[in-house]
Amino acid sequence: MAEVLEQLAKELFAGNAKAVAELTSKALTEGLKPSEILNDGLIKGMSEVGVKFKANEIYVPEVLIAARAMKAGMEILKPKLAESGVEPVAKMIIGTVKGDLHDIGKNLVAMMMEGAGFEIIDLGIDVPAEKFIQAVKENHPQVVGMSALLTTTMVQIRENIKAFQEAGVRNNVKVLIGGAPVTQKFTDEVGADGYAPDAASAVDKAKELLGIS
Ligand code: B1M
């Protein structure tokens, strides 16, 4: 693999946004394909972040810093990816459920998903069922992610899934859920498709649900 891509993955893991931006430009100047820079540079670095985060070898601040570096690289790469017709892995809508204002975990999930090549539409916090449904109808995502941090708001996930069924969109999407009080048992009870305990596992679970290796 090109040396510049190895450096890119390394600097992304280290969260060095300036170096990531420079190396992304350098890789483009060297004539590397945008898809190669994305997969073998940026995503490779971010995957490593996911692995170490899952293993508790690095923590939330390091992930946020790496995500900022990813963003710096993506700003340069995005127009080139669009020009070269590279399709995102899949589209995901994400939001924190109605009544819930916590967004740090949800943002981390969104960043890791983006880092894995997903296109993310972030609906923000305090998202009512109707807003999720409208976004599904307008954007046709493959995955809808719902985050809840309170025992009083996690029940909203059940309501959202019911509302999806009533609106006739439930079968169009995989519903992935998470947040501190959410468990696999709860996921099974409310009929969501998948649960992830952390941001790195969310990437793995979304891919598993979509049959992407
Ligand atoms: Co709040 N809060 N908070 N809070 N807050 C908790 C959640 C709480 C456990 C604190 C406590 O009492 N020990 C408690 C909930 C108790 C419960 O319901 N069991 C609580 C409470 C009670 C409240 C208020 C009601 C307090 C009050 O006003 N009396 C209030 C509610 C406001 C509301 O939402 N309506 C409130 C407010 C706030 C702040 C606004 C001050 C602030 C949020 C700021 C923000 O998010 N922008 C806040 C914070 C920071 C916390 C704690 C301290 C930290 C949450 C956090 O960001 N963790 C939290 C205590 C704690 O968790 N230790 C607490 C870091 C983050 C990376 O982890 O969000 O778990 P987490 O996300 C993880 C995983 O859960 C998972 O991946 C993430 C990354 O690995 N994940 C997903 C999350 N979403 C996922 C989605 C997925 C998959 C995985 O798929 C789609």
Image (cartoon, rainbow, N blue to C red):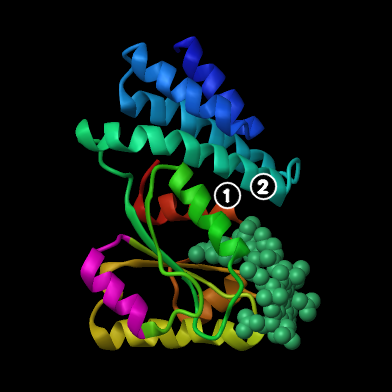
Please name the amino acid that badge 1 sits on.
Ala
Question: Which residue was labeled with disc 1?
Answer: 200
Foreground: 133 or 21? 21
- Specify few, some or many for label 1: CA neighbours under 10 Å numbering under 14, 14-19, or 20 or more: many
Left or right: where does residue 36 sit relative to residue 194? left
Q: Is mark 1 within 8 Å of ligand 1?
A: yes
Residue 120 in view of the camera: yes
Question: Which residue was labeled with disc 2?
Answer: 54
Image x and y of residue 76, in percent: 39, 33
Query: Looking at the image, is 15 positioned above or below residue 114?
Result: above
Segment tinted magenta in the rendering? 130-142
Image x and y of residue 142, in percent: 31, 60
- Specify few, some or many for label 2: CA neighbours under 10 Å numbering under 14, 14-19, or 20 or more: some
Quarter of the figure with the N terminus: top left
Asked if marks 2 and 1 touch (Cβ < 8 Å), the reply is yes
Q: Residue at x 26, y 69 (%)?
A: 172
